[in-house]
Every structure is written in structure tokens, then in C-alpha cells.
Amino acid sequence: MLAETALRAASADFAPPVVVTNHEHRFVVAEQIRDAGIAQVRILLEPVGRNSAPAIAAAACLVAETEPDAVLWIMAADSAISDLPALNAAIKAAAAAAKAGFLVAFGMQPTAPETGYGYIAQGAPMPGLGRVFKLDKFIEKPSPGVAAELLKSKHNLWNSGMFMFTAATLIAEMELYAPEVLHAARDAINQKAADLDFIRLNAAAFERAPDISIDYAIMEKTAKAVVVPASIGWSDVGSWSALAEIAPKDADGNSALGDVVIEKSRNSYARSDGIVTALLGVEDLIVVTTQDAILVAHKNQAQNVKNVVERLKAIKRPEADTHNRTYRPWGFYESLIHGDRFQVKRIVVWPGQKLSLQKHFHRAEHWVVVAGCAAVTCDAELRLVRENESIYLPLGCIHRMENPGKIPLTVIEVQSGPYLGEDDIVRFEDTYGRS
């Protein structure tokens, strides 16, 4: 969905995007953007989460360094849009309003009395701006009864969380209504640091920013708020049940993605990224199988997955914070088998990249090359290890793996020892500046 969001902007002739994400997601974000074929992306790394207003302010300040009058289209990466021609028409209207000095919200035409979205009350037409209207007020997420009443008027719209304005306009309005947010974001940009292909916001400065959304910080206060009503096949895919709503379905209302078998079941969503997953005689379920965890939930409980995550964190389960596949600047690795005193991993190294020169105090490693060619350093020896060949790295040796070839290098790594944690690494040299 991140790649789809970025491509959506590219298809509307916007410049390469600024992506704001956290430190832990940086490599998977870069990987997905690269796989989408989008170049010259700037990826801003937040040291801490501070909600949408500081994130957007930081991006605006970065753009304003060179293009203060640039039009910014703000999008979250978890929305689905099916009608791109209608979207492009809405963008054209919004861009005209943004260039005229307004802050534009995109209001979606409601199709149901939805209680999971906030609403926007559409006001009078803005002279000379076509499909643009005054934004009268924001309405909090309503109760079912209130949502049914709101649906009766075509002037009540879902708040999509998409916005458009120039960098200069946003910065000026933030100076008036959210100066603490602006000053923290501006200082974080002024003291930013380059890290490989990423831009790190200064942690001390950014941490001073209040935790506040762009709606509360600016849009509900500014006198320049307008709205563009749109019907673009939009869905805020913030939960598994929302994803199930937009997924293709069979005659019984079931959605199956991946290695899935469904028998005598109705209105269920099943997705597998690994082993075969079978549903038999069930209704209204969400079943998600990944390589390291399985979720089974009733559709009406899908919004509460966060409660499960909190339980996992409380008992210190790593699945709460880390995925089975871990991205690094050189490629990625994933655990295949984890047992008592041993672990098997798949390691993929991109052409021209290399791991750090390192050693371990508690484990030995055996590398088997299954695709490509590896240049392996083991103490004083440098050896080429080709497909179907292997090399043993005894405990304590100083070693490194590099891909000198033109195709991705794939290695099966067998670790053995009393402790196999990722923190058992002493780095002596690293291309990517890690300690």
C-alpha cells in the first residue's frame, strides 16, 4: 500500500515523494519504494512518533528549503483508492485552491453511516474555485445514531485524512496556530543528518514537538480551510476488516489470498504468506497466517488487534515488535528454523553490497551459497564461495560476506551456540556506519 500511495502521486505528475517514517521501518520502506521504481525519494526518519502535525511540518520545512511554494499533497499509506480519474479531477481542483493560499481537505462522499471516520461539514462554494467549498467544521467520530443523521445530508463528508497546501502556507498557519509544533520540526530539519539514503531528524529537537494531529493543530483553527468533495472509491484500510471489505470475494463473500483453502464458510477473509491455511464451516472470521504468527479474529473484533499486541509486549514476545523478515542496508535476512542452540536463516545480499566485518562471542556459523557468488573473509583468508559450496566460520573468527556479482546472493546460514541473539555482534568495519 505504501508503494501504491507513492505511485498514485507519480501518476498525478507530482515530484518524487517525501516519506516520513520511523527508524525501524526505514529499510523496508526503502525496499518497497525501490521495487516500485520510484527514484529520488527523500525518506525522513522520526526519532519518536509525534502524530501527523509534526511529521507534516517536518516534511514542509524540508521542501521549503528549496521550494517554499511547492504544492504538498499529504497522504497516509493505508488508504485504498479505486477511481483514479475521479481522484485526478479532485487533485486538479485542490491544487488550484492550494496555489490560491488555502489549506484543502479531501472529503469523501459517504456510502454508509460509518462510525469509524470523522466527518466534515461542507459549506458554501468558494468563488472562482470550481469544485472547492468552505470547510464549515470537523465532526468527531459519531455514534451510530448520529452517523445515520449525518448521512441524510449530502454536505456531510468523511474526513479522508488527505490534505493539500503549499509548504509556505502551512508554515505560515503553523506559526499562528501551532508554533511549538513548527519550531520543533524546523529545528529538527535544520539539525538533520544524512544516514545512507535517509535523512535523520534531530532527536532532541523533534522530541519537543507536541503529540497532535494536523486536524487539531491547524485545520480546525485556520480561517483558510476548504474542502474538495470527492467520490473516488476511497477506503481507509486501518484494520483487517477494512481490508476484507475491499478484497475480491467469491459467491459466499469469502476472500482468499495466498495458499488458502475455504470450504463451507461465509463472509470470511483468509490470507497466508506461508503455510496452507484452511477454513471449514466458519463465518465472519479474519484469518492471517505469516511465517511467525497466526491471527484468528471475528470481523467485529478486528479493530482490537492492538490489544493482542499489548499483551505480547507485556510478556516480552519479540513478535510484538519485529517481523520474521528483517531488512538491512545490504539486503535482508529471515529466520527459517529456531531451536535449542541452533538457528537457520536465509540471507539475501544485493549486488555490490556487503555485511560488516564482525565477530561473535557465542556462536559459530556455517554458510551455504544457494544462488550467486559470495566473497567471504574469514580472519586473514579471502575466499570466493560459489553456488552449492559452503564455508565454516568458527566461533570468534573475524568474518564478512560480500556480493561481488550481478545477481542477488542467497545464503543459508546455520548458527550454533549457547546464545544466538542479534546483539552478539562486534563490528570492526561497516560500510553503513553502524556501531
Image (tube, helix red, strand yellow):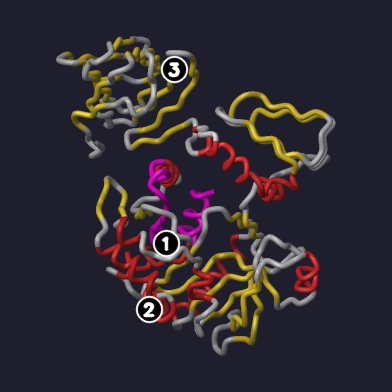
Of pointers 1 and 2, the one earlier in the residue sequence: 1
Of pointers 1 and 3, the one earlier in the residue sequence: 1
The structure residue drawn at horizontal position 62% and vertical position 82%, both measured from the top left corner, is 136
Q: Vertical placement of 63 versus 250: above or below?
A: below
- What distance separates the C-alpha of mark 1 from that of mark 2? 15 Å
Residue closest to the far front: 314
Q: Which amino acid type corresponds to the residue marked 3 in the rendered image?
A: Gln
Q: Which residue is mark 1?
A: 55
Whether the magenta-drawn stretch holds residue 24 is answered as yes
The structure residue drawn at horizontal position 31% and vertical position 62%, both measured from the top left corner, is 205
Q: Label 1: how many residues lie within 10 Å, few (<14), some (14-19) or many (20+)?
A: many
The picture places residue 14, in percent across and down from the top left corner, at 43, 63
Q: Vertical placement of 115 versus 103: above or below?
A: above
Q: Which residue is mark 2?
A: 175
Q: Vertical placement of 130 versus 243: above or below?
A: below
Range drawn in magenta = 1-27
- What distance separates the C-alpha of mark 1 from that of mark 3? 39 Å
- What distance separates the C-alpha of mark 2 from that of mark 3? 54 Å
Quarter-of-image position of residue 131: bottom right
Which one is in front, 395 or 310? 310
Quarter-of-image position of residue 253: top right
Q: Is label 1 in a helix, a strand or a loop?
A: helix
